[in-house]
Amino acid sequence: MDRLKRGSRRYAVGLMSGTSVDGIDAAVVEITGPPGGSERPAVRLAAFENRPYPAAVREELFALFDPREATVDRVGRMNALLGELFAEAALSAIAAAGLAPADIAVIGSHGQTIWHAPEPQRYCGYGVAFTVQIGEGAVIAARTGVPCVSDFRVADIAVGGQGAPLVPFTELLLYGEAERTLLLQNIGGIGNMTVLPAGGTAEDVFAFDTGPGNMLIDGLVSKLYPGLTMDEGGRIAGAGRVDEGLLGELKREPYYALPLPKSTGRERFGAAYVERLLAYRAERGLSNEDLIATVTRLTAWTIGDAYRRYVRDRYAADALIVGGGGSHNRALIGMLKRELEPYGVPVLTQEEAGHNSDAKEAVAFALLADYAMAGLPNNLPSVTGAVRPAVMGKISHPFRP
Ligand SMILES: Nc1ncnc2c1ncn2[C@@H]1O[C@H](COP(=O)(O)OP(=O)(O)OP(=O)(O)O)[C@@H](O)[C@H]1O
Ligand SMILES: CC(=O)N[C@H]1[C@@H]2OC[C@@H](O2)[C@@H](O)[C@@H]1O[C@H](C)C(=O)O
């Protein structure tokens, strides 16, 4: 297949490593229909794999989230190493789809966010905003022989956007409906909501980070239960009781009331926040289960709060569809239903709505890369706050004799 022939059926690979740092998601998708056409592209998932990071890599990545540890040599080395690991993940998924690298038109790689500072700060007399995703695209292109589009977010930040969230661009293409207003809630490390109004166009969509997704739960579990990295199924939270005093204090975090557009990350809800929660637990003698039940409820509350604050007065939502790893946490889903169902908004998982929750973000980066290769804009200024459309992603071409 001629990988450069556009507008026809083609294969693309999407690679994602999210804020939970649980591993590399690789999706191989078959795309039909020209990018940017008036018709929606049809996307079929041909293969999906998740490759957990080796423990040493995960540990080193967590070290690099602390800017005092993230010296330029360590970041540079990890950038190259992640390029190798992403390339391995892509090659493995391509083989799982029964394809060869020569069949693939493009690889879209999100990389690993290690710092996200989208609000301009004064620096050397200038106002500067930035975001850092590592995982070298040149290495991915060289190892796979496939053009790689990487480092998407910086192009949106360069035109005044938050550089996040980016997936809503593809959610509009793949999920938008004429008759129903849908809320798509991702619960990864961070939580983020996309509002797709019935019959809405790109200008009508809005989306934002709701706050912590699993990040606080994971952070507490790994400190309090050595050997565990998550509250599997929500069993720990299910055995605890919410501490209303702590919950009330946590709700006062200023991020929740910020106006849109907004995005957040580990800089706000990372290791230092978890240390504060552990200090509170020690002071008040809270059990592990009660602490984890409380942050689980907080996570559900942030989503209900976002709905009340930004959506309720504008749209009657027909459903909230939950994706990301948090959709496997039954305690969290139960709490979320109690937050939203009183407003007549049913809560469903991506699977219940007929989609693959785990593959969704990787699929999105395959599609974003398809647009980038065609030189077409792939950000949603209404979502990110960018002053104009941008073609996000840097292209690394492999050498092909
Ligand atoms: N079976 C499960 N039970 C409970 N929680 C789960 C389960 N499986 C995954 N999770 C949670 O989901 C997290 C991973 O979610 P996901 O892969 O969607 O995040 P991510 O893509 O890294 O994050 P982001 O979307 O913020 O970039 C895990 O760290 C864990 O907290
Ligand atoms: C800077 C960054 O990596 N942001 C992530 C993170 O994880 C979830 C949420 O915060 C979202 O804003 C974004 O990821 C998804 C893939 C997005 O851009 O849509």
Image: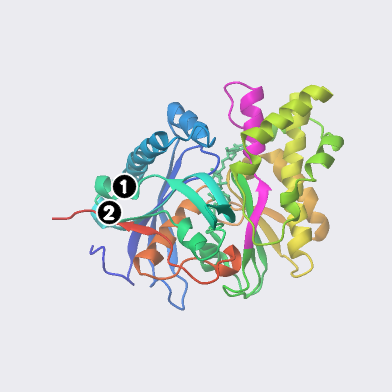
Q: Inspect this view and state whether residue 236 appears.
A: no
Ligand 1's quadrant is top right
Residue 71 quadrant: top left
SS for callout 1: helix
> Where residue 91 sits in the image (x, y, percent)?
31, 45
Q: Residue at x 31, y 47 (%)?
A: 140
Residue 179 quadrant: bottom right
> Where residue 202 sits in the image (x, y, percent)?
57, 73
**Residue 347 vertical placement versus 215 (above, below):** below
Q: Is residue 124 left or right of residue 348?
A: left
Q: Residue at x 67, y 68 (%)?
A: 181
Number of marks drawn: 2
Q: Is residue 100 left or right of residue 38?
A: left
Contact between marks 2 and 1 (CB within 8 A): the answer is yes
Q: Amino acid at mark 1?
A: Ile
SS for callout 2: loop
**Residue 278 vertical placement versus 129 (above, below):** above
Residue matched to label 1:
140
**Residue 68 vertical placement versus 394 (above, below):** above
Q: Is residue 277 left or right of residue 133?
A: right
Q: Residue at x 73, y 46 (%)?
A: 300
Front one among 385 and 104: 385
State the residue lying farthest toward the front. Answer: 125
Residues rendered magenta in the picture? 207-233
Residue matched to label 2:
146
Give me the C-alpha separation between circle 2 and circle 1: 8 Å
Discs 2/1, front: 1
Q: Amino acid at mark 2?
A: Val
